[in-house]
Image (cartoon, rainbow, N blue to C red):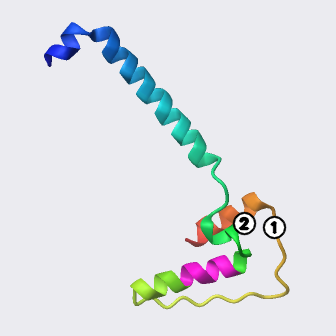
Amino acid sequence: MPTLLLQDAPAVREHITIARELDLLLSRASVQAPRSPFLANSDLCSAINKIITQISLVSDTEIIYQVKGTPYSLPSEVESNLLRIGQ
């Protein structure tokens, strides 16, 4: 074991505790993160179109999608989840 661990075990425990707390805070922040950047300034249809365009630029995949009816806004959480599913 490194000498520091043996000499200053309380300080090591404190650093580990701080690291765990920081990890928990970062995890919570990612769950509560604002809308996807794709949805920040556009609707769900436009966001999906942007993702399809990006995928098409880096692969030989052809993606075809169709919107039927008149698009309308959904709750933010629903749009974010649908976009993630699309990704």
Residue 19 badge: none
Q: Which of 87 and 18 is in front in this view?
A: 18
What distance separates the C-alpha of mark 1 from that of mark 2?
6 Å
Residue 79 badge: 2
Image coordinates of residue 64 in percent, x first then y, are 59, 90
According to the picture, the residue beneath numbered tag 1 turns out to be 74
Q: In this view, does 13 lie to the left or right of 5?
A: right
Q: In this view, does 82 lie to the left or right of 62?
A: right
Residue 39, by quadrant, is bottom right
For badge 1, the amino acid type reads Leu
Query: Taking 54 as reference, is 76 above or below it?
Result: above
Which is more N-terminal, label 2 or label 1? 1
Q: Do the residues labelled 1 and 2 touch (CB within 8 Å)?
A: yes
Magenta stretch: dominant secondary structure: helix
Verify whether residue 49 appears in magenta.
yes
Image: magenta residue range:
46-52
Residue occupying image coordinates x 14% and y 14%: 3
Tell me, yes or no, if residue 1 can be seen here: no
Query: Taking 72 as reference, is 79 above or below it?
Result: above
Image coordinates of residue 31 in percent, x first then y, are 61, 47
